Structures are given as C-alpha cells and as structure tokens.
Amino acid sequence: MYDAILVPTDGNEHAERVAEHAAALAHAMDATIHAVAVVDVQSAAGPFSAGGVDRAFVERLEERAAADVERVVDLAEAAGVQGVETAVLEGTPGASILEYATDQGVDVIAMGTHGRTGLGRILTGSVTEHVLRRAEMPVLTCRATERSHPAGDYDDVLLPTDGSKCAGAAFDHGIEIAEAVGARVHAVSVVDPTALAASPDSGPTPEMVERFESARADAAESVAERARDAGLEAESTVREGTPARAILDYAEERDVDLIAMGTHGRTGPRRLVLGSTTERIVRRADVPVLTVRARGRSD
C-alpha cells in the first residue's frame, strides 16, 4: 500500500520520534522515505526584517535544515530502509509540505505533534494541524512520550469505528499495516449515553442504549471480520463512555501500538466549535495515530 512516506522535520523530539515510526513502516513495506525540511525565511527573520535578510542568514537556516534532514536519513538507514530521498524546501511549512507530497505522489505523511490544547492552539494553529486538515493522503502523527518509543514491529493495531463512512476510511490502511507486521487487530466501538439523551435533564432509555450497543457491536465485529478475512487475529469490543477517552483508555489497557482512524478533514469555524474525536485522540494519544481522510467529507 505504501511505496513512499514523507517525513517533514524541524529537528524537534516529536519529529524525530515519528521519523522512527515512519522508518519502521517503510522497512516493513519496502517503501521509500522522503526526508524534507522547510526553510521559512520570513518567520525566522521576524517582524523587524522589512529591509530583507542577507544571504548568510538564509544559508544558516538552510544548513540547520539540512542537518535536521540528515538525522532522519540516519534513522531510516538504521532501520534498514533502502531508499531515502532528501530535500530542503523554502516557503510556508504547511503549504510546502502539501505541495511536495502532491508533486512526489507520496502515500502517507508522517509528522510529529506537540499535542497542544486550549486557546493558544486555536489562535496559532500548527504545521501538523494545517496538514491534517488538508492532506488528501493519510497522515501519521506521534508525540514523543514514554510509550511512543518504537519497540520492534507493532503487535496490536486499534481500529475505532462508529459504523460511519468516515470511520471506514481507515480500515484498509490499518489492516494492511497489521498484515505487513503480523499485528493483532482490535476493532472498538463506543456508546456514549450522554450523546443519546433527549435533554441534559433526562438520560436515554435502556431500550435506546441497547439498540445502540447492538448496532455498535455489529459495526465493530464487521471490522474484525475484515481483518480475519485478511488472515489476521482480530477481536471486537464495545465500550461505554466519551468516545475519545474510551478509545485512549482501551489503547493503554491493551498496550496498543498504533491507532488508525478516519477523519472528516473539516476546516473553518464549524470544526473549531465542534471538534472531533479524531482530533482529541491525535492530541492526547501516547502512541502513533494514523488519520485517513474520508473522501468528499471536508467542509
């Protein structure tokens, strides 16, 4: 499935951590790594550079970017990756990464994320968030946490589902990764009783909860069956609670190595107001998260 994996880097610990995971995937799938860094001269120069910057300043930025790229090359070669392409780009990071990904026909983008939350994140955004919202190809994100250190092949891959087309966008990717590394698939669906309530003062009826539990159990088992049809060990589970929290708790309890989820890829005020389960998991997960955009569902 993956022939080319793009790894943008700025040299921080989160970028290096996701590069380790990208290298492991590239080795398992015999894919090429594209290691790139973006020199954003305008941002680096700051607001007091109306008169421009000299060539020496730009060269220092390019040298730093080249060193960051070389670190990804070292990680890829240490993982046994045979093909590595490199580039130092110039421009706005998010736009430059997406343009490169399209031009080179990469299959997945692997990026580190700080997991920022709150007003500062909404106002300033991030390069990773910009790419997540707009990329047509899957995006693998990872924070540098104690649990996110790669430790050999993935043993357990988690595929959350609510039975929707959006959730289903990730199943083929998650199952193919599991096939490549011989991982067990966990298909999990969550029933959130608070979301079923008719009003804040009245909870859902037992019959309503039972209907939803049955539907979610069918959705999870359908995903597990797809994995079994591919020759993989798989299990299905229904949890109760807030979706993001329930999924993250399951991932920790079962020592999951990768979460693969669908995303709408929404932008604009609606996304900022509503948020999404996928976004919360990307920000908070202690393991890599692969997000796959559902076609035709962006706002």
Image (cartoon, rainbow, N blue to C red):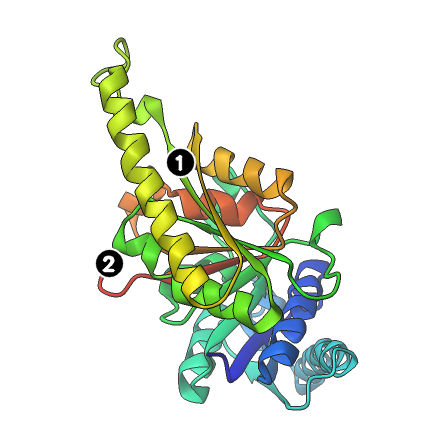
Label 1: which secondary element:
strand
Quadrant, the C terminus: bottom left
What's the residue at 49%, 34% (across, down)? 246
> Three-letter amino acid code at disc 2?
Arg
| Precedes in sequence: disc 1 or disc 2 | 1
Residue 121 visible from this viewpoint: yes
Report x, y in % for residue 114. Answer: 61, 51
Q: Is residue 67 left or right of residue 118?
A: right
How packed is label 2: few (under 14 Cα within 10 Å), some, or many (20 or more)?
A: few
State the residue at coordinates (27%, 16%): 206
Question: How many labels were placed on the picture?
Answer: 2
Q: Residue at x 38, y 54 (%)?
A: 223
From this view, report whether residue 53 is shown above or below residue 229.
below
- Percent x, y for residue 21? 65, 67
Crowding near the residue tagged with mark 1, few <14, some 14–19, many ≥20 C-alpha atoms within 10 Å: many
Residue nearer the viewer, 90 or 106: 106
User: x, y (%) of residue 183?
Assistant: 59, 61
Q: Is residue 16 above or below residue 166?
A: below
Q: Which of the 4 image quarters holds residue 37?
A: bottom right
Horizontal side of 137 relative to 54 (left or right) equals: left
Of the residues tagged 1 and 2, which is closer to the observer? 1
- Residue ranking furthest to the top: 201
Alpha-carbon span between mark 1 and mark 2? 22 Å
In this rendering, the answer to whether 122 lies above or below 63 is above
Query: In the image, residue 141 lies at what x, y percent?
Result: 55, 59
Q: Which mark is residue 297?
A: 2
**Residue 57 appears in which quarter of the rendering?**
bottom right
Residue 264 visible = no
Q: Which residue is mark 1?
A: 190
Q: Nearer the viewer, residue 250 or 234?
A: 234
Identified by mark 1, the residue type is Val
